Amino acid sequence: MNTASPLLAVTRRDALRDELLATVDLLKRRRAAEIDAVDIADYIALHWMEWHGGSLRLTTTGENVCKHLAALLARSAPRPAF
């Protein structure tokens, strides 16, 4: 039985989402050893990442979350004045 409160689960998911782009950057730079094992387990539980042939990779869901985060960052970036 899961004793964690729903609010805690939402907060943890938000924290993972906030760190996802940095985590993906570590994967791209082949530095997965720097990702906390608990974070990896949680990303897998959220279906944002999966093990594939001994390598950790984004799932389609994880890719979509990354695209959404990138779009939010692009939208909030200051625009140059012309």
Image: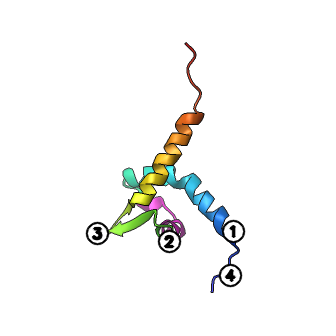
Which label was assigned to residue 45?
2
Q: Residues within 10 Å of mark 3 (few under 14, many from 20)?
A: few
Q: SS class of the residue under badge 2?
A: helix
Q: Amino acid at mark 3?
A: Gly
Query: Image quadrant for the N terminus?
Result: bottom right
Q: Residues within 10 Å of mark 2 (few under 14, many from 20)?
A: few
Residue 72 percent location from the top left of the image: 55, 41
- Residue 60: in magenta span: no
Type of amino acid at the residue the image marks with label 4? Thr
**What is the quadrant of residue 13 in the picture?**
bottom right
Which mark is on residue 50? none
Rounded to the nearest angstrom, the CA distance separating label 1 from label 3 is 32 Å
Question: Local crowd at mark 1 within 10 Å, few (<14), some, or many (≥20)?
Answer: few
Give the foreground label among 2 and 3. Answer: 2
Q: Residue at x 67, y 62 (%)?
A: 11
Q: Would you name the residue on which mark 4 appears?
A: 3
SS state under label 3: loop
Label 4 Cα crowd, 10 Å radius (few <14 / some 14-19 / many 20+): few
Side of 77 where 6 appears, left or right: right
Bounds of the magenta span? 32-43
Kindly report which numbered mark, 1 or 3, lies closer to the viewer in this rendering.
1
* Extreme-bottom residue of the structure: 1
The CA distance from mark 1 to mark 2 is: 15 Å
Q: Are marks 2 and 3 in contact (CB under 8 Å)?
A: no
**Sequence order check, earlier mark of 3 and 4:** 4
